[in-house]
Amino acid sequence: MEVLSLVEYERLDLDDLDSAVAERLRDEHGSRIEIRSPWENRQKWGLTSLGWVGFLPVTPEFGLSLQPKVPLASLFRMLEVAYRLAEFRTDGLFDASSVDDLFELLASILARRVLDRVRHGLYRAYVEEERELRFLRGRLDLLGHARTPWRIALPCRFEEHTPDLDDNQLLLWTLLRIARSGLCRREESAARVRRACKALGGIVSVAPFIGSDATGRIYHQLNADYEPLHALCRFFLDHLGPAHELGDRPMLPFLVDMARLFEEFVAEWLSSHLPPYLAALPQEKVPLGTDRQVRFEIDIEILHLPSGRTVAVLDTKYKNQGFPQSADVQQAIAYAEARNCHHAFLVYPQELESPFRGELKNHTVETLAFPLDGDLDAAGERFLEQLLTRLEPKVAALEAGA
């Protein structure tokens, strides 16, 4: 496969590009890759990645390796924070030298940890079963038996101590998706993933999952070590291509939407660094209208816990620009109005050439920066300090009972 490398928002000029490849890019990936024809781009084809990182197989013979504009170390740190992967530092998480290496390394880590769990014994729980048996087991379904007294088999209800639980099914489904994706190009990694699939496949049934199924789960003493494994499952299921189409390509696309990752990174970073009287609520949904079918989805809402009041809304903008657009400011004001709060912030991944601050009636819109081109912890501390400084008067008023 011929593979071209594209860096986010940097146009790659080509003297020649197959027309079938160009057509497929336009039809299937127009929202991810901007393609400019020779008559639009000084007699050259122009390709630009619009904020996506990963690998995109376009045809069996041609693919695109999409690289981040931020340093690789910053991308690793963003993924670590957003998906809570800190535990995997001991597995050599930062030994990868490229984005492709990172994805393959994480797949290998997941497979190895699953194999370790299988060797030590999978988590099991009692699940109630209803089955017709030739002998009595558990409780007899008297009503069911009375309806069909001529049947020899007995309708029984009993509890089975089984590992065939969604905790384990989620691991198997993710490993099967990875095995089919083509992500593991090294034989050692691919073989480890296959062994993990085989180890689970004999005792766990196959069931489909999506990334959100790996969140909000309950962990306790018996399955606490599943939490980081499910975090990895969420990472892969969020970014692997669709499972229901085989298509004509030997690999599935594995793509990270950097705008979404930036939003999740900022939300998770705030959740772990805000003072205890404030909370960061990601992806808050606000229904509108009498039928409540229209709704806003606010990236991050800052809640004052003692009063239960929203003190700010944050809208992350992973954009390659030096000044906020009018539509972004209007959107931030609408979010603040919907939540009846005074402050709205537009958060950018770099320092803007001209920071913005504007007031409209009872709302203030400001820009803040969480730069990704250096030490993210230091950048996060500066970002948090600026945010808390602007919220201090409102928080003081709430605590005073105003």
Image (spheres, helix red, strand yellow):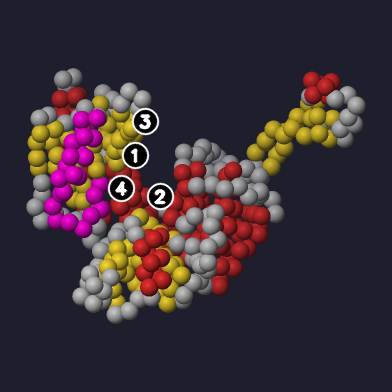
Other-residue count near label 1 (Cα within 10 Å), few / some / many at <14 / 14–19 / ≥20: some
Amino acid type assigned to the residue bearing label 3 in the image: Gln
Instruction: Find out whether residue 331 is within the magenta segment.
Output: yes
Q: Which mark is residue 263?
A: 4
Q: Which mark is residue 293?
A: 3
353 displayed left or right of 184: left
Q: Which mark is residue 283?
A: 1
- State how far apart marks 4 and 2 are (Cα): 14 Å
Q: Are marks 4 and 2 in contact (CB under 8 Å)?
A: no
Q: Which mark is residue 84?
A: 2
Read off the magenta span.
316-338
Amino acid type assigned to the residue bearing label 2 in the image: Arg
Which one is in front in this view, the residue at disc 2 or the one at disc 3? 3
Looking at marks 4 and 1 on the same chain, the residue that comes earlier in the sequence is marked by 4
Give the residue drawn at x 33%, y 63%: 33
Foreground residue among 348 and 40: 40
Give the residue drawn at x 20%, y 30%: 337
Give the residue drawn at x 66%, y 48%: 205
In the rendered image, residue 283, in percent from the top left (x then y), is placed at 34, 39
Looking at marks 4 and 3 on the same chain, the residue that comes earlier in the sequence is marked by 4
Amino acid type assigned to the residue bearing label 1 in the image: Gln
In the rendered image, residue 398, in percent from the top left (x then y), is placed at 19, 24
Does the image show residue 232? no
